[in-house]
Image (cartoon, grey):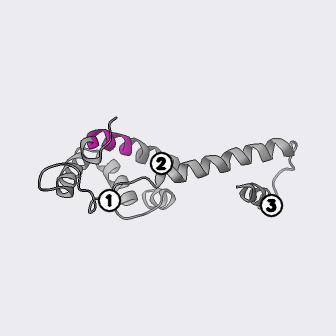
């Protein structure tokens, strides 16, 4: 992570204003790098539909697929589109933002809220107690 901080300093645009407070800049860059690591770890948590045997009954992952399909059908079309592009087609948030002509922040917010909503609705299938 330390390397990332110094690389960010090194790759600052040449025409950027000189730093008034180098220590403050490095401190903020270290915090941002740590947050990037935490976010990337959170994004990696997922449930594989094919390997999921929880959910009881004969269907296993088939029941989870049906429940997910029902939950996705209840979403607004744009929200479902963004979620599908992100998790079923593997596009990144910046790619989705460019495709749909919206900001990366909006994509991230929609993905986050949709994941929370689906986690609540599918909690019994994925073993989430919340």
Q: Quadrant of the N terminus?
A: bottom right
Percent position of residue 34, x then y: 65, 48
- Considering only vertical position in the picture, is 123 above or below 66? above
Viewer-side label of 2, 1: 1
> Which residue occupies 75% across, 59% down?
3
Q: Which residue is mark 3?
A: 10
Direction from residue 42 to residue 83 in the image, left or right: left
Direction from residue 81 to residue 57 in the image, left or right: left
Percent position of residue 111, x then y: 41, 48
Mark toward the start of the polypeptide (2 vs 3): 3
Q: Which mark is residue 48?
A: 1
Q: Residue furthest top?
A: 130
> Which residue occupies 40% across, 41% down?
113
> Which residue occupies 84% across, 50% down?
17
**C-beta proximity under 8 Å, tags 1 and 3:** no
For marks 2 and 3, give the CA distance.
28 Å
**C-beta proximity under 8 Å, tags 2 and 1:** no
Q: Residue furthest left?
A: 58
Tell which of 98 and 70 is nearer to you: 70
- Residue 103 appearing in the image: no
> Which residue occupies 42% across, 57% down?
100
The span picked out in magenta is: 114-123
**Element type at marker 2?**
helix
Q: Main secondary structure of the magenta part?
A: helix
Say if the magenta span includes residue 121.
Answer: yes
């Amino acid at each position: 992570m330390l390397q990332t901080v110094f690389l960010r300093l090194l790759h600052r645009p040449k025409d950027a204003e000189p730093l008034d407070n180098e220590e403050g800049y490095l401190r903020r860059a270290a915090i941002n790098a740590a947050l990037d690591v935490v976010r990337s770890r959170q994004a990696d948590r997922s449930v594989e539909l094919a390997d999921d045997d929880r959910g009881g009954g004969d269907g296993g992952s088939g029941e989870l697929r049906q429940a997910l399909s029902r939950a996705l059908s209840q979403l607004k079309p744009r929200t479902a589109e963004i979620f599908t592009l992100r998790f079923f087609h593997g596009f990144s948030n910046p790619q989705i933002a460019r495709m749909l002509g919206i900001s990366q922040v909006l994509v991230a917010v929609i993905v986050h809220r949709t994941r929370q909503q689906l986690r609540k609705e599918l909690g019994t299938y994925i073993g989430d107690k919340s």
